[in-house]
Amino acid sequence: MSLHWSQQDVADALNSAAGTVSLGRHSVYRWEAGLRLPQEWWPLLCQVLGVPEEAMQAAMARAEATRGGSRALVSWALAGGLWDRADADTLAATLDGDQAVTAGNATAITHAWLVTPSPQVVHQRAGRRIGTELLDDLEQRTVRLRRLDDVAGVTVLLPAVMQEFRETVKLAREASYTEASGRRLLALLSEQAQLAGWVTCDTGRVGQGVSLYLAGVKAAHAAGDRTLAALNLGCAGYAYANTGRAAEGLLMARSALAGCEGSASPLERTLLLDKVAWTAAMAGEAREAERAVGRSDASHDDVDDGAERPDWLYWCSRDESDVMAGRVFTEIHRPLRAVPLLTAALERYDTSHVREIALYSSWLAQAYVDANEIDEAVAVASRVYDLAAVSDSPRAVRRLDTVLDALAPHQDTPAVRDLLAHAVRTRPDTTTA
């Protein structure tokens, strides 16, 4: 079927579907010419053109092979559209101000990110040498993107994260800077790679996510930051463990922990032990998983809550470790240990973090099924269903499917039968941009 669309028609259709205005016809031209691949856009491209996702993935694989298998990270981003100076000034004021990120404004702020000229681009146009002021600015932008990850859906967040990362990569390649500034810039690149990997994995594109994580490992090593390198390696292991490559994931998590023994703070060590616990559970190593949970708990006892911490650890807390422990105990079939940990942590969780509540509640529902508490499982699963439907997270929908599969053998219970029938009619979509 031929739609007889121009390149601008394709760009307009994609912008309309994504609820943004960031894509220009030049990006479509680059895709057609084989200069770039529609990395973040391909699911929506399938939608607007009516092309099966399998066919699009196969075409992209062939294109990558033709290009020698290159996966240049600098091409994994959006090309910005043309904007008037007044538009850019207005959006920059919104983006760079003190406006707090909330569930209500996260989408608008993320869209603004895509169309506001970034400090990286401005400095390159001016031919400036990278200095402390620019690095301060870029670090604060990365902090803001992390906070957006708490409340913004992946559809709007991924393009913004990838654009920021691409422009920082280009800055590192083409600008001039001192050795000290270079180390700081590489550390920033590693942090952005970790965030980009995390958001990419949420869409289900684990191969791309792990590539980003490993780029972050390399950048952190070059910057001399062992714990930041370990964070990226542990995240890569976590991603592998969730997609059927648990043995490799466990090896990565063990290596991350071993790589910074003696240099990691108690909180950093806690995070890395949590990765070991999870990957061990997914690999079927129940005893190692339990030992890692115990070591994580002991490590958290040594955490000084008043001590300075890197921003990439801002979210780490006792509750988060308890959630991880509850998930681990669920996976190794210790529901009586899992349920109290998950229940207590979820009662204190920020209600604006819909994705996390949906995800963590899914393990609580699974633990109730394992404990043969089917009524409680259905009640929690119903909540997971409602949250997954509005979370804009394919990962949350996949977890919902796991819970429904666990409930399926109990269809003789009316509540289970009703929930499964409702899910068949109205299952949330996993399409992302």
Image: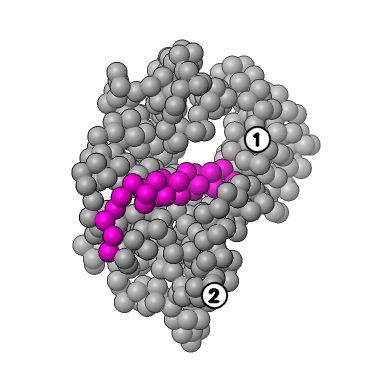
Quarter holding residue 287: top left
Residue 403 lies, in percent from the top left, at 61, 37
**Residue 145 in magenta?**
yes
Please say whether residue 53 is visible from this viewpoint. Answer: no
Closer to us: 368 or 297 = 297
Closer to us: 30 or 388 = 30
Secondary structure mostly seen in the magenta stretch: helix
Instruction: Name which residue lies at 55% across and 53% down.
Output: 97
Residue 2 lies, in percent from the top left, at 48, 84
Instruction: Name which residue lies at 49% across and 48% down.
Output: 145
Indicate the secondary structure of the residue bearing disc 2: helix
Count the numbered circles shown.
2
* Residue numbers of the magenta segment: 127-152
Q: Which residue position holds label 2? A: 13
Which residue type does callout 2 highlight?
Answer: Ala
Instruction: Name which residue lies at 21% across and 62% down.
Output: 68
Which residue type does callout 1 highlight?
Answer: Asp
Please say whether residue 3 is visible from this viewpoint. Answer: yes
Q: Is residue 404 left or right of residue 73?
A: right
Q: Is residue 95 above or below residue 89?
A: above
